[in-house]
């Protein structure tokens, strides 16, 4: 036998080869049929790299043709009657087994340990919170959010039903409306301008009504921050304007 001959290990009819993880150096048993596809990393290191974004598909963009094919191939496969669980319901026996299994796993002792561990968990510093907030704001800019909303609006949405949503409801749930609310809150310092209450349940109110002045719906100067109680006192709250 040659000195450099590869030594395979046979386990239950399958052949394995000892390999070391290129990241942590841990020895792993790799099946021979997976050697060509093996990334050179153990499972934990491979998962860690994926979480960090160091994946083999990072930076790879799908063509429009490929996206269209994926969209067409996935439509209707798992919806309605085609779903494997359509029309099926769990029996009372099955529900009881699931309930007993959960109760058995989450005993009072386990819940007590989970509570203690969560209380002893180190708190996130204000500096870290600020960094996270800034990184999110840097990525999800108003322009990016509007672009994402436009790409899934109307007929482009997989939930499109032919335009059955009322126009006012669609506007109030749009990204543009959310951005308008955020701008009003930020300008007023998240404080009710009438009673001075800060935070809590605050709402953005239209000074000139949403219904009668459609051209001013997204005008920041036409908005004001009010708490729930003060908002109810306005003439335009709810259906008062229709009376």
Image: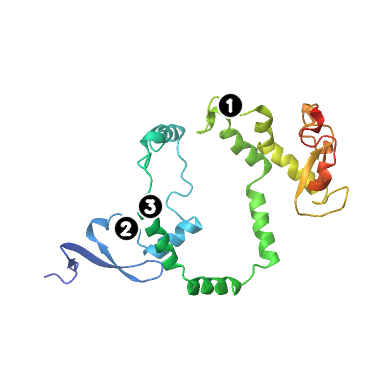
Residue pointed to by mark 2: 38
Q: Secondary structure at mark 1?
A: loop
Mark earlier in primary sequence (1, 2): 2
Query: Label 3 to label 2, Cα distance in Å?
Result: 45 Å
Place of residue 135 in the rendered image (x, y in percent of width and height, measured from the top left): 64, 54
Residue pointed to by mark 3: 92
Q: Relative to residue 156, is residue 105 drawn left or right?
A: left
Work out which residue is located at the far top of the displayed protein and give it.
162
Q: Secondary structure at mark 2?
A: loop
Location of residue 211 (image quadrant): top right
Q: Relative to residue 44, is residue 37 drawn left or right?
A: left
Q: Relative to residue 113, is residue 202 drawn left or right?
A: right
In the image, what residue occupies the spot 75% across and 50% down? 201
Q: Mark number for residue 229?
A: none
Specify few, some or many for label 3: CA neighbours under 10 Å numbering under 14, 14-19, or 20 or more. few
Mark earlier in primary sequence (1, 3): 3
**60 vs 87, nearest the viewer:** 87
In the image, what residue occupies the spot 83% across and 48% down? 188
In the image, what residue occupies the spot 56% across and 34% down? 152
Query: Label 1 to label 3, Cα distance in Å?
Result: 38 Å
Mark earlier in primary sequence (3, 2): 2
Residue pointed to by mark 1: 164
Q: Badges 1 and 3: C-beta atoms under 8 Å apart?
A: no
Query: Label 1 to label 2, Cα distance in Å?
Result: 50 Å
Number of marks in picture = 3
């Amino acid at each position: 036998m040659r000195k450099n001959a590869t030594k395979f290990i046979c386990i239950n009819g399958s052949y394995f080869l000892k390999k070391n993880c290129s990241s942590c150096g841990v020895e792993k048993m790799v099946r021979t049929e997976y050697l060509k596809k093996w990334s050179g990393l153990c499972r934990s290191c491979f998962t860690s790299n994926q979480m960090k974004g160091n994946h083999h598909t990072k930076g790879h963009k799908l063509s429009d043709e490929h996206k269209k094919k994926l969209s067409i191939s996935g439509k209707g496969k798992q919806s309605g009657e085609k779903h494997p669980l359509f029309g099926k319901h769990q029996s009372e026996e099955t529900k009881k087994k699931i309930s007993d299994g959960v109760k058995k796993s989450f005993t009072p002792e386990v819940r007590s340990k989970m509570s203690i561990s969560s209380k002893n968990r180190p708190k996130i510093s204000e500096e870290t919170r600020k960094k996270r907030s800034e990184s999110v704001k840097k990525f999800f800019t108003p322009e990016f959010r509007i672009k994402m909303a436009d790409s899934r609006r109307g007929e482009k949405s997989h939930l499109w039903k032919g335009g059955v949503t009322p126009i006012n409801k669609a506007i109030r749930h749009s990204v543009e409306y959310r951005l308008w609310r955020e701008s009003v809150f930020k300008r007023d310092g998240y404080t009710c301008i009438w009673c001075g209450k800060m935070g809590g349940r605050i709402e953005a109110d239209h000074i000139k009504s949403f219904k009668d002045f459609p051209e001013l719906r997204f005008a920041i100067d036409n908005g004001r921050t009010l708490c729930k109680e003060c908002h109810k006192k306005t003439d335009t709250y709810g259906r008062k304007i229709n009376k």
